[in-house]
Image (cartoon, grey):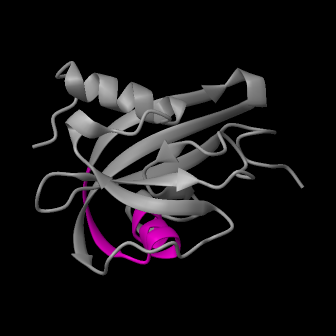
Amino acid sequence: MAKPGVDYVGVGVGVMVRNEKGEFLIGQRQKHSKNEPGKWCFPGGTLDFGEKMFDCAKREAKEEAGIDVEPVRLVNIIDHILPDEKQHWFNPVVEARLLSGKPIVAEPNKMAKWQWFSLDNLPENLTANMVKFFNEVKEGKISLG
């Protein structure tokens, strides 16, 4: 069976959730993740065939972090190319409003922990697409509203 991101370009929806302090919900991947193990990223995952992007954002936030969100808008699109891992992902980043729940590790085989981070205090070991995203935020190319 063909694998997204490996045998063809995969679509992985990222979910940007901020709390009332403006901090971002970012999780650390498990050591055996399918790419960039141990690095930090937004909740998110593979878009299923026939699934709408906002529906994927809601599903992934619930599956990974145990939270209910309402997608608000598409914030950015990132080509997440990982030459060393021979993977290519197309990552739409969706801003979502937290409706209910406190972040938990709902998929312990995928994520190690969740934390809230301010823009001035991001973890050092971000995934490649997160580095691109936050650089564009800091450069003013992405508006956080």
Say if residue 83 shows up in the picture: yes
Tell me the residue at 61%/37% (across/down): 89
Where is residue 10? Give x, y as percent: 65, 43
Location of residue 3 with respect to 112 vertically, above or below: above
Using the image as rendered, state which of residue 137 and residue 46 is in the foreground: 137
Determine the residue positioned at 40% across, 35% down: 77
| Quadrant position of the N terminus in the picture | bottom right
On screen, residue 72 versus residue 45, left or right, reads left
Identity of the residue furthest to the bottom in this view: 101
Q: Nearer the viewer, residue 22 or 12?
A: 22
Number of residue marks: 0
Q: Position of residue 139 (x, y in %)?
A: 21, 18
Extent of the magenta region: 56-73
Image quadrant of residue 81?
Answer: top right
User: In front here: 95 or 135?
Assistant: 135
Q: Residue furthest top?
A: 139
Residue at left offset 48%, top offset 32%: 129
Residue extending farthest to the right is: 1
Decide whether residue 85 is among the magenta residues: no
Horizontal arrangement in the rendering, residue 112 relative to residue 55 (left or right): right
- In magenta stretch: residue 64: yes
Q: Quadrant of residue 82 in the image? A: top right
- The vertical placement of 49 against 79, above or below, is below
In this view, the residue in front, 49 or 38, is 38
Answer left or right for 71 relative to 4: left
The residue located at (53%, 65%) in the rendering is 51
Residue 118 location (% of width, % of height)? 22, 44
Quick one: quadrant of the C terminus?
top left
Q: Is residue 86 visible?
A: no
